[in-house]
Image: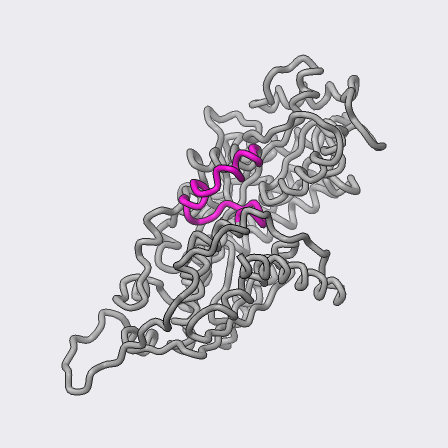
Amino acid sequence: MKRRLWLGVLVLILAMVTACGGRGPEVSAPDPARDAEDSPSMTPTATPPRPVLEAGVVTPPPDYSTSVYGYLEALDPVDAEVTLWYAYPDARQFQFEALVQEFNLSNPWGITVIAENFDTPALLYQEIITGIPKLNYPTVALVDSYQIPAYTARGALVSFAPYMESATWGMEAALDDLAPAAQPSPATADYGWPWAATTHVLLYNRDWLNELGHTAPPTSWEDLETMACATTRQSFSRATGEGAVIGLLYTVDVDNFISLTRNNGGEIVGTDTLSATFAGPPGIEVLTTLRALTQRRCATRHAEVAASPEAFGTGRALFAFVSIADLPAYRGEYDVAAAFSWGATALPRSTPRPVQSVRGSRFVLFNVRPESQLAAWLFMQWLTELEQQAWWLTATNEIPAQAQTLRLLPEYLAENPAYAHAVALTATSAHDEPLLAGYPACRALLAEALTAIDGGANIQTTLEAAEEACTALLHAAAR
């Protein structure tokens, strides 16, 4: 109990210290669900064994490269240092740093993890890519899953397989209970250790929908348009505060565009893995519809609203496209503002079933000193344990890697039905982004195109130009 109270205090201290330096906002302590009894597995009673090779004993050579891994069964990680790079440009930075500090203070080997945060995942990616030729990279990095093939193509990563199979350090069973959103693909199975994932949903004001004559949220774009535009004629009877009435709050960014395009029957990269396809009719229709709804004053971009959670929470916005990581902010406004029933559902679609696009984050291990690599592996093991997974879930609302984490928190899920429904959607349909060596650069071009479109550029010509450039990048990376 004391250790968890300390962790909550540490999050606050980290937030205040960072705020004083001008780096970010202050955040509150994690959910009280963290304050449970200590797990015996998290409080080691003795230092783990440090195996040594017996003199004169002839042993068969290991089936891994000892120049990369050392002799794992004889390796000693005591007092090793680990450099960790990650990118959380929001309050999650403080929660993650708190976990790092807890590991540093509690691990029995005296391992020290030195963490560095980057402003965006794109900046982290560029720092790693430019550093690989000069061997300027960390021990371990927390990256978006779609970046991993670019690192493996450059030969910078170390496979986790020897660690998982190690008699002394192994943890292969941890991968037997992965949540659907964390399931590995052939591109990430040995090189990406799962951590968490996010997805997009449609938030809706159930009571306002009932006042407009609807008994269920929209499933199609046609229904969404009808309901969102009805708000221009009838505001919510229990709305509070001041501000414009909003039918739909949305953002034109890569994550939301991918989710909406997939639910409109499109895809970002073709089945040949060499051709970008986001400029097809599904993607163009999504952006055209959002622009038309905005012009009719049925929709408003998040960027044009001073506080989107406040607009929804006070009953002035009927719908909002949001990431599940943002749900705590929306719930916070709801709890203190207008009392109404609300929920989360799948994005509007033209497909028979929802296509739940996820953005997963995984740890990757770089080729450095064997002792540091092993120490990083032990840190990742610790993060994968259910106690840390549960704390991260309640602190950030991300989807944890371990499916059992959700089963251990029935009260939290009952108190957060919007989050529970979003996670349930990923259980039946979880689609990661394309896992191709050329995709990260392709994604950056798509982001630039969407920014231009958001500023008024022609939708079709802008998307087509980006698609052509992306296809060239995919071909170049496949050579």
Residue 90 visible? The answer is: yes
Q: Position of residue 395 (x, y in %)?
A: 58, 50
Q: On screen, 269 above or below 114?
A: above
Q: Residue at x 66, y 37 (%)?
A: 331
Q: Residue at x 38, y 71 (%)?
A: 374
Residue 477 visible? The answer is: no
Foreground pick, 363 / 264 = 363
Q: Position of residue 333 (x, y in %)?
A: 72, 38
Extreme-top residue of the structure:
213
Foreground pick, 274 / 118 = 118
Quarter of the figure that contains the C terminus: bottom left
Q: Which residues are magenta?
A: 393-417
Question: Taken as a whole, is the magenta stretch helix, strand or loop?
Answer: helix
Residue 375 belongs to magenta span: no
Foreground pick, 50 / 142 = 50
Q: Position of residue 52 (x, y in %)?
A: 26, 80
Q: Seen in the image, is 265 located left or right of residue 205?
A: left
Extreme-bottom residue of the structure:
56
Q: Seen in the image, is 443 located left or right of residue 295?
A: left
Q: Position of residue 103 (x, y in %)?
A: 50, 66
Residue 58, located in which quarter of the rendered image? bottom left
